[in-house]
Image (cartoon, helix red, strand yellow):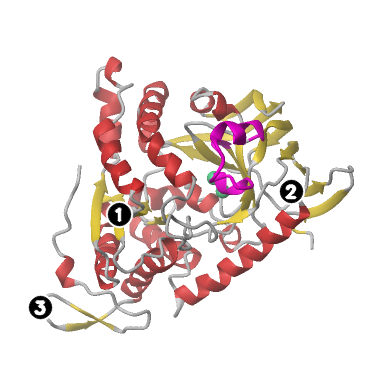
Amino acid sequence: MAARVSRTTSLRAPRACDPTIDRADGRLVAMTTFERNLDNLARVALHVGVNLQHDGRLLLMGPIEASALMHRIVAGAYDLGARSVHVQYVDSRMGLIRAQRARPETLAEGPQAYADMIHTMAARGDAYLRIDGDDPDLMSAADPERVATMVRATREVMRPVSDLVQRSFLPWTIVPYAVPAWARKVFPDLPEEEALSRLWDAIFAATRADRDDPVAAWDEHVQQLGTAATRLTEGAFEELHLRGPGTDLRLGLSVGHVWECGGRASGSNGVRSVHNVPTEEVFTAPHARRVHGTVRATKPLSYQGQLIDDFSLTFEDGAVVDFTAERGERVLQGLLDTDDGARRLGEVALVPHSSPISQSGLLFYNTLFDENAASHIALGRAYETTIARGIDRPLEELQSDGFNQSLTHVDFMIGSAELDVDGVRADGSTVPVMRGGEWAT
Ligand code: ZN
Ligand code: ZN
């Protein structure tokens, strides 16, 4: 359902150091640090995240609680000369209500009309900006199997959209927003207001929205990530060998695999967009049929509002053949049963343990943050941009080269200060890539 923003005229997009803001009544009032940082976050979302161009179209999606940020983004988009902005408010509680109350035989029906509308916008290359902020435990009150049925049905109807997104056909990004239930989960011992304020501090630091010139800071950061990705691509390893507590995993890599970082892939018009804000990772695709060994997660996984914790997976010939989970075993089972590709890997990402998000010492129960605090792997679909000429070649050809296809893509964390990674060359020689969770060189 589309919602229109009603107050776009009362906000203009201030510059980073602008000490004042115009209100609808024309008075000038001092901006608080919070307001300045929120303005900066909107700038980062538009200028770095989707890199919105003059005359571009924007699809903006976010939780109803995030309207303060979304108003700023809409104002900034029109100031940049946007042709149109479509705002889609999301109330994830509606999903919980459906999971608890709808007749069981109706849960397998995905939101086709909604998917068609989003696909129309994605297929013409509209920039897609999603605001992410939710209660990590929202769906825990519902039956995991009913939730899994709904999630699968939604993924099925959204597949044409996710195909375009995974191929980077359009500029897209995900940007965080602190909501009280999320803050309470991250800071369970603090009063709600303080928890929310602490979560915002962490968000502003990780997204560089607390800098005087956040866009310049991002340019520098993206360049550094690009250098690390290029070095790994040039390494042209045949496999990676990962070792850590509970982990001994060999990940085959396809011939011609490409290491990417969030700031490299381009949209249909060739414009750089940074797909996750924050981002600290460089990543590529493991070979779907050449993964062997066991891997232990180092952080809990919040999957569709349900927690999976203390879990490990064993792979043979690329597929999960065994798994254990102290918590959320049924949820993990549901994830693995999504389809054949959900039992195989579509991403391996390396993040130094010294990354700023990791150093915050916080567990965010949110993939956007936790995946940037630690090296991780993802069950499910790979990104075409991580395989040579992946965007131009037919899917069957990519699959025979080891590209994983699935309805899902779920990252989980395997990095720690004890993770060692070796690159293995075709002749069997090894090169240290990470030692003790840090780049070896
Ligand atoms: Zn990742
Ligand atoms: Zn991922």
Disc 3: residue Cβ within 8 A of ligand 1's nearest atom: no
Q: Earlier in the sequence, mark 1 or mark 3?
A: 3
Query: How many discs appear?
Result: 3
Question: What's the residue at 43%, 44% (across, down)?
Answer: 164
Callout 1–callout 3 Cβ contact below 8 Å: no
Residue sitting at x 42%, y 59%: 269
Q: Which mark is residue 60?
A: 1
Numbered disc in front, either 1 or 3: 1
Secondary structure under badge 3? Answer: loop
Image point 47% across, 59% down: which residue? 277
Answer whether labels 2 and 3 touch (C-beta < 8 Å).
no
Q: State which region is magenta.
A: 379-402
The nearer-to-camera label among 1 and 2 is: 1
Secondary structure of residue under mark 1? strand
Q: Is residue 268 left or right of residue 34?
A: right
User: Is residue 33 inside the magenta stretch?
Assistant: no
Residue 287 % position (x, y): 68, 36
Which of marks 3 and 2 precedes in the sequence? 3
- In the rendered view, tell whether residue 352 sits above or below residue 365: below
Taking the image as shown, residue 425 lies to the left or right of residue 383, namely right
Q: Nearer the viewer, residue 8 or 396?
A: 396
Residue identifier under label 2: 419
Q: Secondary structure at mark 2?
A: loop
Q: Residue at x 65, y 31 (%)?
A: 400
Q: Earlier in the sequence, mark 1 or mark 2?
A: 1
Q: Residue 202 versus residue 254: which sits nearer the camera?
A: 254
- In the image, residue 233 sits, relative to residue 331, either above or below, namely below
Residue found at the far left of this picture? 25
